[in-house]
Image (cartoon, rainbow, N blue to C red):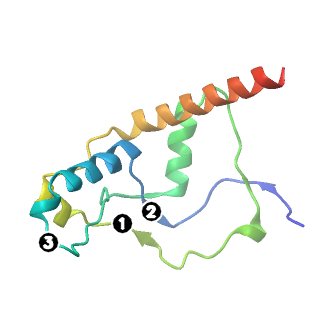
Amino acid sequence: MSTVQSQPVRSAAERDFLPVSDVVRAHVDLIGRGLDIAGGSVFNVASGRPRSIASVVDDLRRHARVPFEVRVAPDRMRPSEIPVAAGDATRLTEATGWTPKADWDAALADVLEQARATLGRTKQWAG
């Protein structure tokens, strides 16, 4: 059984996060240029900017309307095998002109607003 402890998020692992609008735009750009791109080409859709999990939680906390705590289940944590994973979208940019454009803070605010709306609907249905 998992013992859950309230503690700060202390993950040294860094990952490359992108707002979904940037990912969709990259796919649309690739599809739009499909005939001009050699078959079998591989492209990274990435910001090139690694962010720690702790920094993402801190960013979410800044947008939260109420304080929250993060509970970590130590038995579910795994050591980070890859300390930093960030993509290089240079080939994608060269082929399509694509670059990430979405504002990170605005994207997080949108995620939280969507979660609030969903939670509100859930409470309404249960009520």
Q: Residue 58: x percent and y percent?
A: 54, 44
Q: Determine which of the numbered discs, if any, sits on residue 24 in the image.
A: none
Q: Quadrant of the N terminus?
A: bottom right
Discs 2, 3 touching: Cβ within 8 Å: no
**Element at label 1:** loop
Which residue has dot 2 on it? 15
Circle 3 residue? 38
Kind of residue sitting beneath label 3: Ala
Q: Earlier in the sequence, mark 3 or mark 1?
A: 3
Task: Give the total of numbered labels.
Answer: 3
In this view of the protein, which residue sits in the foreground, 96 or 81? 96
Q: Earlier in the sequence, mark 2 or mark 3?
A: 2
Q: CA distance from mark 2 to mark 1?
A: 6 Å
Neighbourhood count class around disc 2 (C-alpha, 10 Å): few under 14, some 14–19, many 20 upward: some
- As drawn, is 96 to the left or to the right of 84? left
Residue in view at x 53 percent, y 34 percent: 62
Distance (Cα) linking label 2 and label 3 = 29 Å
Q: Is residue 61 above or below residue 95?
A: above
* Label ID, residue 86: 1
Establish if 67 lies above or below 38.
above
Which one is nearer the viewer's eye here, 4 or 107? Answer: 107
Percent x, y of residue 121:
69, 24
The amino acid type found where label 2 is placed reads Arg
Mark positioned earlier in the residue sequence (2 or 1): 2
Q: Position of residue 74 (x, y in %)?
A: 75, 67
Q: Are marks 2 and 1 in contact (CB under 8 Å)?
A: yes
